[in-house]
Image (cartoon, grey):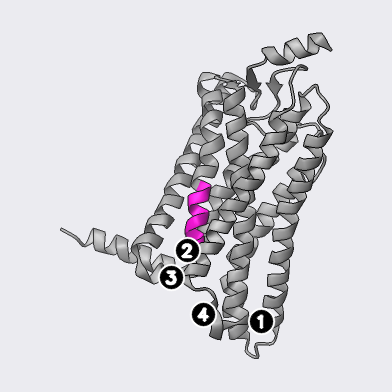
């Protein structure tokens, strides 16, 4: 016990294993992930600028989309730059403090997105099921309150999770079998009794995933019931088309996160899990702007108008 304690105190840095491959493959992966990262940042910043500068987009739906784009800009920034440094300079070391900070912000952003997606489902529910009262219900103050509540909930849950995780000690190894500091790989190398940390993490994971998912399911059940009652097929298609993008993103997000987090965290973080992590930490933030906004006719019209004015200028 004394030896373990001494070893645990000596661990001040971790080694992120990443994706061990040959040097040429590492360089190729660096270029691919760098391109994805730059595209993701550019897409989300474009959406934020469009929503901020165009009064036609000053609506609750786009207000929440702006928050989602802002969130995902930081979402990829928390994990991808460190992964790029692993690929290009093979800098796999990360300090204990940096690891806990990365874990904190990553969890906070994931939890915030869970709540924000539920808020966006509620917005679509009000728009389709209570269109006459939409402006009254989704007023500016209420939208701000919902957005701030999403951020507050996500960061609060992250504080609780990271507090209990940071109290464990590490002595088995300092090698984290992942490309960023995630809960399961960190707990896999802990050497003290972590039942409380695992229990708190598991309960909060189920809470933050299942409650918003349940609210989203209820919202879409009401939406579906309303759409079915619309007499014309064109009316049905028009009503449900406003929800299609959000529904696709919800399915992708929850399919990945439920697989990764709604299970005991001592489960081994194998390479398959890392590949699943790539989907929701790298690929999903890249696709979401396209799914949500760049396929939206209203956004397309504004974007094409801006480009036309730019091209026709002096």
Which residue lies most toward the bottom here?
231
Q: Could you say where residue 210 lies in the image, as x and y percent from the top left?
A: 75, 56
Find the distance from the CA under tag 2 to the CA under tag 1.
Answer: 24 Å
Sequence-first disc among 4 and 1: 4
Left or right, residue 201 beside residue 123: right
Label whose residue precedes the other's in the sequence (2 or 4): 2
Q: Can residue 198 be seen here?
A: yes
Cα separation, mark 2 vs mark 3, equals 14 Å
90 and 136: which one is in front? 136
| Cα–Cα span, label 4 and label 1 | 22 Å
Q: Earlier in the sequence, mark 3 or mark 1?
A: 1
Q: Is residue 162 above or below residue 231?
A: above
The spot of residue 178 in percent (x, y) is: 67, 29
Q: Secondary structure at mark 2?
A: helix
Q: Is residue 277 left or right of residue 197?
A: left
Which of the two residues, 273 or 116, is positioned nearer the viewer here?
A: 116
- Label 2 vs 1, first from the N-terminus: 2
Which of disc 3 and disc 2 is earlier in sequence?
A: 2
Residue segment shown in magenta: 62-72
Query: How many labels, in total?
Result: 4
Q: Which residue is mark 4?
A: 136
**In the image, residue 14 above or below residue 7:** below
Whether tag 2 and tag 1 are in contact, CB under 8 A, the answer is no
Q: Which residue is mark 1?
A: 227
Point out the frontmost of discs 2 and 4: 4
Q: Earlier in the sequence, mark 4 or mark 3?
A: 4
- Within 10 Å of disc 2 (Cα), the crowding (few <14, some 14-19, many 20+) is some
In the displayed structure, would residue 66 be above or below residue 1? below
Q: Secondary structure at mark 4?
A: helix
Graded by Cα atoms within 10 Å as few (under 14), some (14 to 19) or many (20 or more), the crowding at tag 1 reads: many
Residue at 70% across / 18% down in the picture?
174
Q: CA distance from mark 2 to mark 4?
A: 16 Å
């Amino acid at each position: 016990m004394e030896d373990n304690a001494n070893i645990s105190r000596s661990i001040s840095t971790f080694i992120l294993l990443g994706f061990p491959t040959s040097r040429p493959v590492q360089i190729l992966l660096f270029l691919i992930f760098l391109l994805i990262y730059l595209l993701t940042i550019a897409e989300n910043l474009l959406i934020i600028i469009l929503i901020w500068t165009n009064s036609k987009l000053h609506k609750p739906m786009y207000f929440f989309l702006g928050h989602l784009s802002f969130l995902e800009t930081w979402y990829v920034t928390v994990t991808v730059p460190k992964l790029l440094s692993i690929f290009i300079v093979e800098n796999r070391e990360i300090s204990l403090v940096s690891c806990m900070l990365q874990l904190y912000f990553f969890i906070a952003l994931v939890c915030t997105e869970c709540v924000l997606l539920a808020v966006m489902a509620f917005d679509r529910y009000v728009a389709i099921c209570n269109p006459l009262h939409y402006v009254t219900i989704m007023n500016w103050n209420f939208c701000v309150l919902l957005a701030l509540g999403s951020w507050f909930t996500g960061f609060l849950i992250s504080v609780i999770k990271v507090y209990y995780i940071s109290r464990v000690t590490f002595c088995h190894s300092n090698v984290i079998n992942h490309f960023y500091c995630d809960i399961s790989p960190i707990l896999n190398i802990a050497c003290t009794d972590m039942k409380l940390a695992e229990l708190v993490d598991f309960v909060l994971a189920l809470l933050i995933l299942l409650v918003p998912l349940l609210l989203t399911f209820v919202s879409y059940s009401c939406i579906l019931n309303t759409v079915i009652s619309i007499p014309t097929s064109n009316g049905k298609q028009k009503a449900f088309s406003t929800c299609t993008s959000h529904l696709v993103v919800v399915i992708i997000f929850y399919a990945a996160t439920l697989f990764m987090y709604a299970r005991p965290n001592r489960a081994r973080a194998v390479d398959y899990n890392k590949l699943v992590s790539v989907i929701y930490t790298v690929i999903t933030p890249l696709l979401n702007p396209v799914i949500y906004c760049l396929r939206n006719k209203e956004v397309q019209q504004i974007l094409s108008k801006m480009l036309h004015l730019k091209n026709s200028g002096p």
